[in-house]
């Protein structure tokens, strides 16, 4: 396993990177957010309770020796059926350098350790880079509808 990258929980000092990421217009093509969060919203988010079991979602930072390079999100986590959705963002300066693949593998190991049985991702059909990433991480493409392809990983 590549240990150049690791996952960690959000911290208050992530505000600048979070703000840059969430407000960059070039990152909006594949987001599901209807409005861009402002600095106050992001400060509140950083201070909020990040409890996967309680809220069904969790954002972690993809970190490196030089600082954060991206985020990996869990959403729609279902502790009864032990399944969760995955979303990932890596800063364009760190793409194709192993950060995303490392993060997906680390997350899979973490979720397996927590007792989860599967992860899934809904990826836009016009996002071949993400298709390739999830396939390299061992996810199987099971169907596509409404402009999205679903990828599933059994843990």
Image (cartoon, helix red, strand yellow):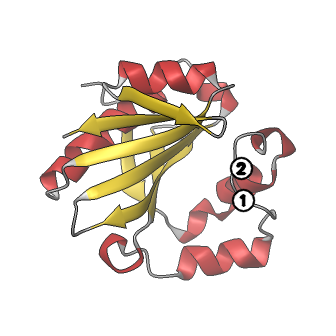
Q: At which x and y percent is residue 32?
A: 68, 54
Circles 2 and 1 in contact, beta carbons < 8 Å = no
Q: Is residue 97 visible?
A: no
Left or right of 141? Residue 129 is: right
Q: Secondary structure at mark 2?
A: helix
Q: Residue at x 38, y 19 (%)?
A: 136
Residue located at (29% from left, 36% from top): 153
Image height of 129 relative to 18, above or below: above
Q: Nearer the viewer, mark 2 or mark 1?
A: 1
Residue found at x 78% / y 71%? 39
Give the class, few, some or many, for how many residues have Cα within 10 Å of label 2's Cα (few <14, many ≥20): some
Comparing 29 with 125, the one in front is 125
Residue 69 or 136: which is nearer the viewer? 136
Q: Is residue 69 above or below residue 83?
A: above
Which residue is farthest right? 25
Residue at numbered disc 1? 33
Dividing the picture into quarters, in which one does residue 27 lie?
Answer: top right
Give the spatial CA distance, label 2 vs label 1: 13 Å
Q: From this viewpoint, is residue 44 visible? A: yes
Query: Where in the figure is residue 85, as x and y percent of width and height?
Result: 42, 52
Disc 1 crowd rating (10 Å Cα; few below 14, some 14-19, many 20+) is: few
Q: Position of residue 118 (x, y in %)?
A: 25, 46
Label 1 secondary element: loop
User: Looking at the image, is 84 positioned above or below residue 3?
Assistant: below
Residue 25, disc = none
Q: Which residue is mark 2?
A: 21
Q: Quadrant of the C terminus?
A: top left
Instruction: Tell whether 124 sits left or right of 120.
Output: right
Name the residue nearer the viewer: 27 or 17. 27
């Amino acid at each position: 396993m590549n240990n150049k990258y690791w996952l960690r929980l959000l911290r208050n000092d992530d505000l600048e990177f979070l703000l840059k990421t969430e407000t960059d217009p070039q990152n909006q093509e594949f987001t599901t957010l209807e409005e861009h969060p402002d600095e106050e919203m992001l400060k509140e988010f950083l201070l909020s309770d990040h409890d996967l079991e309680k809220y069904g979602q969790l954002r972690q930072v993809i970190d490196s020796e030089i600082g954060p390079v991206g985020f990996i999100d869990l959403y729609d986590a279902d502790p009864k059926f032990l399944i969760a959705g995955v979303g990932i963002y890596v800063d364009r300066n760190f793409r194709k350098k192993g950060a995303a693949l490392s993060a997906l593998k680390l997350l899979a190991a973490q979720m397996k350790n927590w007792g989860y049985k599967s992860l899934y991702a809904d990826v836009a059909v016009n996002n071949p880079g993400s298709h390739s990433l999830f396939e390299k991480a061992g996810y199987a493409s099971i169907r596509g509808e409404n402009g999205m392809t679903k990828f599933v990983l059994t843990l």
